[in-house]
Amino acid sequence: MSDNNPFEPIETTPFQSHPPQNVQGWERIGSLAGGVLMMGKGLRRGGVVGLAQLAIGGMALARGITGHCSAKSLLEKNRQNLNSARARIEQAGDELSRLKANAEAATGTATVTGNDSLDSPKVGL
């Protein structure tokens, strides 16, 4: 047998690791209350609509119990990416402004000799 094991051990699974809490305070309390309310409505109503209400209520209840919302963390991550992109664009704009100022300063002292290389190109090129 070879020493190469095709199976790698899994360090943690999503159910073993505890994600950071991103739902606190009134938002968490609202998720708990809304989840219980939706689950109760779903159980009383029955059918497909009741099953959907039960599922949504269960998700809200789980959000309130764990204090973590994957959708909210995804939105926060995208907001951070947007802010970093905005900062890079602002830096590029500042750099462009500096380059423009340097180019204007360099061309401000340039003199024109009257030899337009487009009308009369140098011989031998």
Image (spheres, grey):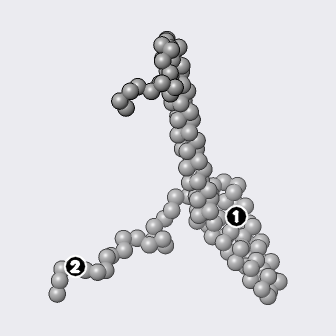
- Above or below — where is 42 with respect to 120? below
Q: Is residue 72 visible?
A: yes
- At mark 1, the secondary structure is helix
Determine the image quadrant of residue 62: bottom right
Please, what is the three-letter code of the amino acid marked with disc 2?
Asn
Please, what is the three-letter code of the amino acid marked with disc 1?
Ser
The residue located at (72%, 61%) in the rendering is 30
Where is residue 70 drawn, in percent x and y?
Answer: 59, 64
The residue located at (78%, 82%) in the rendering is 50
Q: Which residue is mark 1?
A: 31
> Which mark, by number, is residue 103?
none
> In screen coordinates, is 10 left or right of 22?
left
Where is residue 110 drawn, in percent x and y?
Answer: 48, 14
Q: Disc 2 versus disc 1: distance between alpha carbons?
A: 48 Å
Pick the front one: 56 or 90 = 90
- At mark 2, the secondary structure is loop
Pick the front one: 14 or 91 = 91
Q: Which residue is mark 2?
A: 4
The residue located at (80%, 77%) in the rendering is 41
